[in-house]
Amino acid sequence: MTLRQLLTHAVLATLVTTPAFAARVLDEATLKIDGQERRYYHLRDTETPGLAQPILLLSGSGCKDFGSRVPFFFERYPAPVDVYFLEKIGIEKGADGQACSDAYNQADTLERRVSDTLAFIAQEPKLKSMGARSLAIMGFSEGGAVAPLVAARSPKIGWLATGGSGGLPQSEVFLIFADRGVEPYAKPFSRETFLKTYAAIKAEPQSIDKEFFGHPYRYWSSHLFYDPLTTYAKLDIPIIAAMGEKDDSEAIESGRALRDYFAGHPEKNFTFIEYPNAGHALQAPNKANLQDFIAGLAAWFKSGVKR
């Protein structure tokens, strides 16, 4: 049985045989990281303590309040849940993401997200007590770039799952879209526009005032030129990556680069799932794949099956 079939079977079996977890709750708490009070969430099932695979969830870019939406992603998860989520700096509860705070913009870098996540693992009481390779990390979109770096630096991480994230630098992804004629990368922008902007960002990497694509130069200088494959090459844990064929935020070529890299390293436990006609959130015109992908991870954690 292929892993795709395994994931599908697990979801279907759950709908028939597994009762809903009536006592699933979302707790909110705070802790301090570098002297700053930080809000985090814990989604758990009170009826089945100790039976769930602990998961650390990382969201994508932007300053929209994400924590309250965590339960939605696990609505079809067929096993007990034990999910932890750290909210970013400078995001108020209920924030719609339309205007990001100065505190958020100042802290919004790849390096800061990685260091904050590592500090969260080291300080949150349950996560702090966990042993080596006992915690799963799951990142979507921008979180999918952060998660491998955390996995490479924390011995507690035993599984890595990503969605809407691949193996190419973001700077290359934008050029791929421009060359393919995908809007807005090709119109109103262009390959020439991106190359000029890259040079400007490199000239003023810490600028908060100058922006591109809705983010300050400071943000882009930390994300654009980072090569994810250098981190993936260091990992020796089970990895699963999912992307939509029609993703217009992260080019499918980026996911296929990840696939092709691991094809040359069959000793690694890696699985790539490409959803036909699906977009960045794995949403296809006639099928929402995201929740099914997450639901299937329950079987993947246990199986260790390679595709």
Image: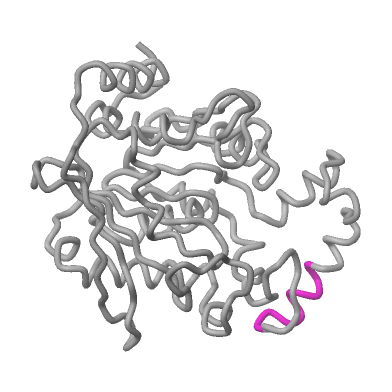
Please name the predominant secondary structure of the magenta segment in the image: helix
Instruction: From this view, report whether residue 146 is shown above or below residue 288.
Output: below
Dividing the picture into quadrants, the one containing residue 114 is bottom left
In-image side of 139 versus 54 (left or right): right
Q: Quadrant of the N terminus?
A: top left
Q: Is residue 36 left or right of residue 96?
A: left
User: Residue at point 28% right, 57% down?
Assistant: 84
Closer-to-camera residue (286/251): 286
Q: Which of 14 and 247 lies nearest the eye of the viewer?
A: 14
Q: Quadrant of the C terminus?
A: top left
Q: Is residue 78 left or right of residue 235?
A: left
Is 13 on the left-hand or right-hand side of 205? left
Q: Nearer the viewer, residue 304 or 85?
A: 85
Question: Which residue sits furthest bottom?
Answer: 35
Magenta span covers which residues? 198-206
What is the image's colouring? one colour
Give the x, y percent position of residue 232.
46, 48
Query: Residue 279: percent from the left, percent from the top?
Result: 63, 36
Residue in the image at 26% along x and 46% along y: 158
Asked which quadrant contains residue 26, the reply is bottom left
Q: Position of residue 304 (x, y in %)?
A: 27, 28
In the image, residue 187 sits, relative to residue 22, either above or below, namely: below
Which residue extends farthest top? 1
Question: Residue visible at 19% across and 37% down?
Answer: 21
In the image, 73 versus 147, the foreground residue is 73
Q: Position of residue 42 (x, y in %)?
A: 25, 58
- Answer above or below: position of 251 versus 28: above
Vertical arrangement, residue 266 with respect to residue 152, above or below: above
